[in-house]
Amino acid sequence: MTRVTGGNLSNIDGLIRANGTANLFLLNPNGIIFGSNARLRIGGSFLATTATGFVFPNNYQFSATNPAPPLLTINVPIGLQFGNNPGIIEVRDAILRVPTLTSLALIGGNIVIENGTLFAPESRIELGSVASAGLVDINSIAPLRLSFTASVTRGDILLNNEAFLPATSILGGASIAINTRHLEMRQASGLFTGVEGFGTTEITGGNIDINATVFVQSTQGSDIRNNTRVVNGNSGNINIIAQSLLLSNNAVVSTSTVAEGNAGKIAIALNDTLSLDGDSAIVSTLGREGVGNGGESEITGRLISVSNESQISSRTRGVGNAGNIRINALDTVIVNGFIPDIESSRGLSARIESGVNQGAQGNGGNIEINTGSLVVTNGAVINAGTNGNGSGGTIRIVARDRLLIDAGISWSQFGNPTGIFTTLEPEKDNLNADLRGGNIEIDTGSLSINNGANLSTSTFGRGNAGNIIIKASDRISLDGAFRVETLFDSFVQSSGVATRVGSTGIGDGGDIDITAGSLSVTNGAELIASTSNRGNAGTIRVNVQDSAIFDGSFEGKPSQASTQVEFGALGNARVIELRARSLSLTNGDRLSVTGEGVGDAGNIIVRADAVRLDNNAALCADTVGDQGNINLRSNSLILRRNSTITTNATGSNNIGGNIIIDSDAIAALENGDITANSTDFRGGKVTIDTQGILGTQFRQEETSISDITATGANSELSGTVAINTPDIDPSAGLIALPENVVDITGLVDQQCSRQARRRAFHRVPMNPSVLTPFWLIW
């Protein structure tokens, strides 16, 4: 133990040497500065501190401010006693290195490492900043471990201009611990731990532990990494506790493994804000040559913001599963923005993702978000997909107040998707049919998807797309579409909820289940379950307590709920089942289950008190394959202005579908049609049970007025129409009135008209806005 007395700080610009394996503890409360030529040549641990003294079990202090003679026999110190305003510790352009299985610790006032390196192979690095009087406990010496109680006021630590703290190992266990008020890392500075070389299955890297009472800020390419490059070894964890964590301008927090072993866990516990901006990242990765699993990322805070190409991600590029991502934010999670890439005509999105890269083997991890509000905007994505050989992860979101997904301006030039996605796109030569895309599960107060944003699951390989389950205690609003104009394409992208079997997919689309207070689908938005290749489209189930409204279009593209087999595809369009207090479709909008490929059109089931179709709206189960069916039950049904209910069929030997309507009152006006026709074969069957029907009737063929038809290719192939109404005699109970008209001329008194002037008293006002006159001459 060495103490510096007096009032001067220590400028060290040369070699510090200690013989043998002894630890060296250096004490100067006034401050310690290590210059560019400072070096360590010691056999044990090194501790530099600006405490006032070392504290021992017998309450003896080895003090620099009250330098009593040293004892001949001294026990291991148990603490560092600090006075007011502890001196600074600086490392400027110096490299301080300790031998293996030791510790390197700097414990003082504010600490600055400027273009310096603290190197501790197989060892431990510990930094602690203290701002006022207090005791820092020494828990152990080999390795050196200290603890900072809540009563110790912390100071600040700055790592600047490529300041490095590497604590790597071959045997595992090298670690870094930092206790501070503010930790700031600038200009490509870094904290590094990990395992390198050859080891055994028991090897695990040490942790990076950061405890900051206010904030941790990393910027300008600064990194916090815990990586493993060893055969049979696991990387350690990264643990950060602070009020806020701010990452910007390519800053990274990362765990990874690129050999055999698992990546470590990232645990971030904040009382306030996590902000990632400008291509910054929190990442856990299984590398291309890795065999193991990616690490989990668990983040808690009040506000979590990921913007401008930044990411929270877990990926596997080797053989193994990606890690899970869990985010808990008391108030809000924001994923926002993208950075344009002019050369590729694309944008680079802010994202939260877990996935399997091309060439990898393993399953994607799950993403779980629990918050008050979740906002995904302007080209940002939340994605759990696989491009390798494995199944996708599940996305689970609980947003107590609201979930907003809004594409904003991101579609205008670059065609970047905005939304929440799970995608299954495995290797083309993968014949494993048991793969599956991940599900999306959402529980929220309200859900809004706007301006071409999407919430979707899809499969483009061999395997099924995931399901989408949405529960909203209040409302769900899907609104708008966008004309995308890129250098290579032009198309309309609708807002909506979708499950798809893509053009290269072999598998079934997922189901969509929606439970909400109300649903509105407007201005070209859509609920869609489709198949473009080989596989069945999914089922859409909607259950709302109040109204379901479909209204408006975008450039001729209607708002709709649809399950469809697209042209050239092989598969069936399944079911749309909608239950609501009222259903309204207007201005060309539709519920449709259509088959344009090889397969059956699906079924439409509607249960609502009131159903209204107006201005070219439709319930449609048309097909070029086997018949589709419509089953509708309501208290009232209104069709106006060219609106239709159809199960028409085209193609050889294709029968028109069946229509079953059970409604107390039906009005079909201004060419509102109900048809189950077949252009090339037998017409279908229409069955209507009603108390009364107005404006339409059965006809042999369609006309320009309202019709009910089941027309076939010819009269012998016509279908059937059955309209069942109660057998009621409308004349029953009527009262016969007198047939003779009474001449009332003699019954009217003419006296009033002959009076010239009379006064009348009125109590009923002639005009409610004025006072009643007491008298009036008439």
Image: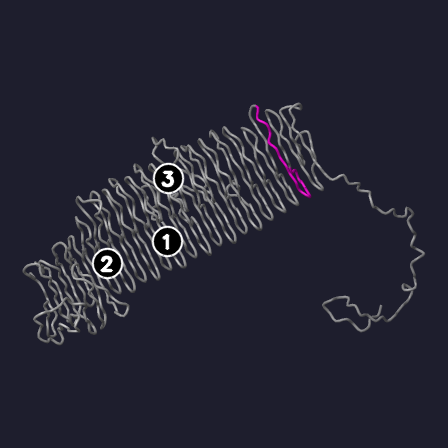
Q: Which mark is residue 436?
A: none
Q: Secondary structure at mark 2?
A: strand
Q: Main secondary structure of the magenta part?
A: strand
In the displayed structure, does residue 769 sit left or right of residue 243?
right
Location of mark 3 (residue): 391
Where residue 210 sits in the image (x, y, percent)? 26, 59
Q: CA distance from mark 3 to mark 1?
A: 22 Å
Residue range highlighted in magenta: 653-672
Of the pair 762 and 289, the residue shown nearer to us: 289
The three-letter code of the residue at mark 2 reads Met
Q: CA distance from mark 1 to mark 2?
A: 24 Å
In the displayed structure, does residue 363 sit left or right of residue 184?
right
The three-letter code of the residue at mark 1 reads Ile
Q: CA distance from mark 3 to mark 2?
A: 38 Å
Q: Which mark is residue 185?
A: 2
Q: Secondary structure at mark 1?
A: strand
Label 1 CA crowd tier, 10 Å (few <14, some 14–19, many 20+): many
Pick out the residue farthest to the left.
Answer: 19
Q: Quadrant of the C terminus?
A: bottom right
In the displayed structure, does residue 465 sit left or right of residue 761?
left
Where residue 42 sits in the image (x, y, percent)? 8, 59
The three-letter code of the residue at mark 3 reads Ser
The quadrant holding residue 144 is: bottom left
Location of mark 1 (residue): 327
Disc 3 or 2, which lies upstream in sequence?
2
Q: Secondary structure at mark 3?
A: loop
Where residue 586 sits in the image (x, y, percent)? 58, 44
Residue drawn at the location 13% of the way across and 76% of the way down: 66
Q: Residue 412, can we see it?
A: no
